[in-house]
Amino acid sequence: MNIANWQMLEELVSASFAEGRGFALATLNLDHLTKLRRPGAFRDAYAAQDFVTADGNPIVWCSRLAGQPVELLPGSDMILPLVRLAAEMGMPLGLVGSTEASLAGAARALQDEVPGLEIAAMIAPPMGFDPESEAADAILRDLSGRGVRLCLLALGAPKQEILAARGRRIAPEIGIASIGAGLDFLSGLQERAPLWVRRLALEWLWRMLSNPRRLAGRYALAFRDLPGHLWRSWRLR
């Protein structure tokens, strides 16, 4: 389901928590659109997501051209609202991904911001982690056994979306939100673009300049495909 705004997502997540149902939440960006053009595990995983938000201005532009506008809801911006909602409803939190240092820093930041928050699990999978492995299933069963009801998943695409989709079968009571680098931003191990840069829709440029070796090729492919995405969106009207 495409999520139009935070109010809609808040209502759906609250209902899921109240009814003991889990969910998988993906945050769609331009790089994901490029990856989704090819059949495979990533596309299958996206099809299994319950909620999808716009994590990038190009997605918002496409939605407007298609006549189905949605608001910008990046994963990093949704962390605190989701965690506050979980704490208010007594839902224990799990953190999965990144590194042990990042998870510890993110946990401290969240507990400072959200009094009464219960963090039931923090798991940093090893390098080369396979989201379709028995080790992945063991993580999901561990989260379930510890009573986690909201899991923030920070593995990067496509691993986090594949693991979240797997969680719908193995731990169906857990809400899993894929948030990319969100925990690293919270812990301070990565610096997020300043607000004025985000308001100019240039966060992608900030991130690319901070790590050009890893991101330059990815963004080049994504922006190569952007005109086609905009054209197809306009035709959907």
Image: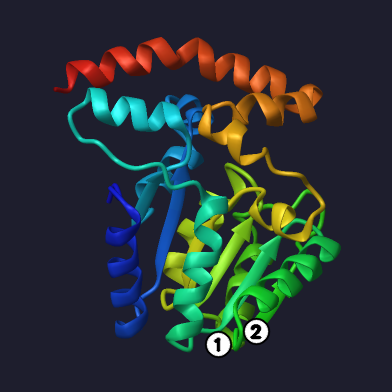
The location of residue 55, given as percent across then percent down, is 47, 41
The location of residue 182, given as percent across then percent down, is 64, 53
CB atoms of marks 1 and 2 within 8 Å: yes
Q: Say the numbered circle drawn on residue 192.
A: none
The one of 24 and 215 positioned closer to us in this rendering: 215
Q: Quadrant of the C terminus?
A: top left
The crowding category of the residue bearing disc 2, from other C-alpha atoms within 10 Å (few below 14, some 14 to 19, many at least 20), is: some
The mark lying in front, picked from 1 and 2, is: 2
Residue under circle 1? 147
Q: Earlier in the sequence, mark 1 or mark 2?
A: 2
Between the C-alphas of marks 1 and 2, the distance is 7 Å
Residue at 82% across, 52% down: 189
**53 is higher (above) or lower (below) than 16:** above
Residue 111: quadrant of the picture: bottom right
From the viewer's perspective, tell me whether residue 129 is left or right of residue 34. right
The location of residue 20, given as percent across then percent down, is 35, 83
Residue at 65% across, 82% down: 119
Residue under circle 2? 120
**81 is higher (above) or lower (below) than 1:** below
Residue at 70% across, 31% down: 207
Q: Secondary structure at mark 2?
A: strand
Disc 1 residue type (three-letter): Gly
Q: How is the image coloured?
A: rainbow
From the viewer's perspective, tell me whether residue 60 is left or right of residue 81. left
Disc 2 residue type (three-letter): Ala
Q: Secondary structure at mark 1?
A: loop
